[in-house]
Image (spheres, coloured by chain):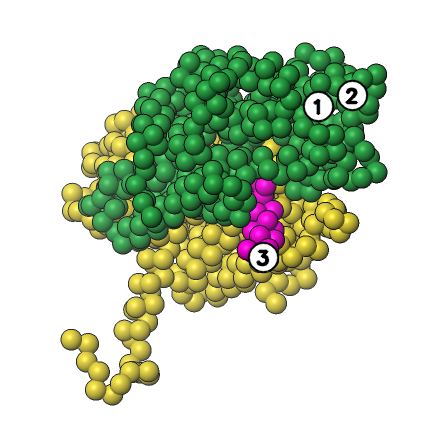
Amino acid sequence: MDFELGEDQKLMAEAAREFAEKKLMPIAEKMDEAEEVPKEIYTELAELGYFGMLLPEEYGGLDLDSLSYACAMEELARGSASVMVGLSVHNSLCCRAIYEYGSEFLKKKYLQKMAAGEIIGSYCLSEPGAGTDAGSLRTTADEKGGGFLLNGTKSWITSAGFANIFIVFALTDRAAGHHGISCFLVDRDTPGLNIGAKEKKMGLKPSDTREVSFIDCRIPGENLVGEKNKGFPIALSLLDNGRIGIAAQAVGIAQAAFEEAFKYAHEREQFGQPIAHFQAIQFKLSDMALKIEAARLLTHKAAVLKDRGRSTKYCSMAKLFASETANWVANQAVQIHGGYGYVKEYAVERYFRDARVTEIYEGTSEAQRIVIYRNLCQKK
Amino acid sequence: MWTTLEHDKYRMKIREFAESEVAPYATRIDRQQVFPEEIIPKLNDLGLLGMQVDRKYGGTFTDTLTYIIAVEELSRVCGSTGITIAAHNSLGNFPIYKFGNERQKQKYLPEITTGGKLAAFGLTEPGAGSDAGGTRTFAVKTGDGYKVNGTKCWITSAGICQTVVFTARTSKEGGTHGISSFIIKHGARGFASGKKENKLGLRGSDTRFLHFDDVLVPAEDRLGEEGEGFKQFMITLDGGRISIGAMALGLAQGALDVAVKYASKKQLDGQPLGFHQGYGFKLADMATQIEASRHLIYHAALLKDSGKPFSRESAMAKLHASETGTFVCWSAIGILGEAGLTDKFPVERMWRDVKLDEIGEGTSEIQRLVISRLLLKEADRNCSMFGFPPDWKSE
């Protein structure tokens, strides 16, 4: 068992770290205040191939293995968790949905442009009445005239303000419950698709999150992704990818918060010495580093196993542990900063606010525990 | 139990006021970062501006538990209002009432009680946080007063108050023995507040630096004798801790109330969310921690009024309540899911607000220091060697 990262992973991580430190960190506070990511950032990320990380070279993608992807995403999240999450949804949920389950027609039409960042994807599963219980969604897709008519509302949609396409889950067979869900691709400019107002969130503020509603939204039959009524298994399988992304995000946030706290503790003097000389602070820093290391290792294991076949249990464990770690570490980081941790001049309060959502989206911590338990009960 | 029927009736009165008059502006002042000064006359009418001060000087002089209940109920709906009242009473009024002479009390207290003006406490400095004795604001003797130079930071209500009690070093003697306390009002030449701090939470509370630039303070505005400042603020903080604990308790209670109501109404798999053990047991833990905090705080409040020593109890109360506050408000967001992350519900604001309680008025680390040192002192006085082998020696 070799714990060393390979050359591929190291290169990806270094490149992403350079981008994060040069381009994201210097503007992170401004983006948080403005609640917006400048377009140029997405353009630059596109030029470097970050919109095609999980697509094969035939579509112009980087064809990264999951471990390289996790390394890159951790570094980007360390710079800006908000910029990273848009990439995570685009790559792990939208690109993979079309690549793994889309028809040749859809793949030819969209994937090249998605890899180039010319088409940005967003993902619509959650609804006001269907969060953790995603299978109880109520958006409908009635077959009409060779296509489908969508009606319903999706909530908490990342990048909704500027995404070009939406992967949408809706009921094609209302009577069949989650066995009647299908997966669709909807272009932004389809009549009947309405984008709501930007949500005012406590964290990940620059990430554009909105409600997306469908009112008699007519889409062509060829926009069905995968088989009719087989959409729920697609959603579940995509979650594995998504969870690795979010686990990596959480590790990145935790790492950033830890670095700030470590630096501050060695600079700040009280009682005539750096506060890092006091055991209470030393023990906190040790525990923070320990938890981050464990979270990173679990995330890497999940990524490696993913590429060898499905690894739902590990993806779920990684997401759960890493997100809990990010929250705990960010809280400690604010505490180490004392009064300075409470004002916006210092980055730690932003890491504290950004960390919270990692325990909620892409499956709450409660949902992860349910998934893990179910996997524990499965015979090997 | 700790509370009487009178206390319970009082709580209902303040709760009704808080829910009808304070809760409606809580989101707005968090967004706009402005304390709603129009609420001050209403707070004054309820006697909330002079709770620790004798009626002789315009106060309402309630017992500490009544004061705690007021801070709790206001904080439950709006942390910024809670902290403004807590800082005003415990840190602003209290030192003048406790350590001032008759002339000072007559001169300064009526304005900041029934007069409806706010008071603030200038202790913390950029280089003196947990090390509050590391004061570097200097008060140099000149004529029949002092010339003061220095900077204070993170001062609650600095920009909207009238009167400030502050500490400064009057003696070159290092450490804590050379510190004195003074009273000053806005308008004094050379005394100014800085820009409003852009904070994580309590954004409706006005927090700023205070700058002293060759400010002349007459000797008659010094509280007590020279060199008594450290002892005075330690006593002030002992009491202030209980009110910050009450603030955290109120915020936690508010978050719990929202989370429980949500978990009782939101359905998951045909049952209320709270019926599922993963969520229900979390609520149980939240509620139990809040109850424990409540008992610690109320006990400390009663001890304070009894005249018995209460430093250990107030430190424990503040420590437990503030850490509980962060845990409960953080968990409440999880119960509400994505919606809890937005300003549609107050829980994310409560979490941002309550985090300050682990930091202000003595960080959790300082509370642990206070408690551990008091425990060791008690052990020292206790001659019994219970639990030790008879021949045990400490070398």
The structure residue drawn at horizontal position 62% and vertical position 19%, both measured from the top left corner, is: A104
The chain in green: A
Label 2 residue SS: strand
Where is residue A93? Give x, y as percent.
Answer: 57, 29
Identify the residue under disc 2: A148
Residue A133, quarter of the rendered image: top right
Closer to the eye: label 1 or 3 = 3
Q: Which amino acid does label 3 sit on?
A: Lys
Chain name for mark 2: A
Q: How far apart are marks 3 and 2 (CA)?
A: 40 Å
In this picture, residue B208 sits left or right of residue A179: left
Label 3 residue SS: loop
The structure residue drawn at horizontal position 40% and vertical position 62%, both measured from the top left corner, is: B312
Sooner in the amino-acid sequence: mark 3 or mark 2 = 2
Sooner in the amino-acid sequence: mark 1 or mark 3 = 1
The structure residue drawn at horizontal position 70% and vertical position 55%, both measured from the top left corner, is: B275
Q: In the rendered view of the protein, which quadrant contains the C terminus of chain B? A: bottom left
Same-chain status of marks 1 and 3: yes
Depth check, front residue: B225 or A302:
A302
Q: Colour of chain B?
A: yellow
Label 1 residue SS: strand
In this picture, residue B193 sits left or right of residue B395: right
How many residues crowd mark 2 within 10 Å: few (<14), some (14–19), many (20+)? many
Q: Which mark is residue A224?
A: 1
Where is residue A74? Give x, y as percent.
Answer: 40, 33
Q: Is residue B69 magenta?
A: no
Where is residue A127? Give x, y as percent.
Answer: 70, 33
Residue stretch rendered in magenta on the structure: A356-380
Depth check, front residue: B55 or B164:
B164
Identify the residue under disc 3: A379
The structure residue drawn at horizontal position 32% and vertical position 71%, both measured from the top left corner, is: B378
Residue A199, quarter of the rendered image: top right
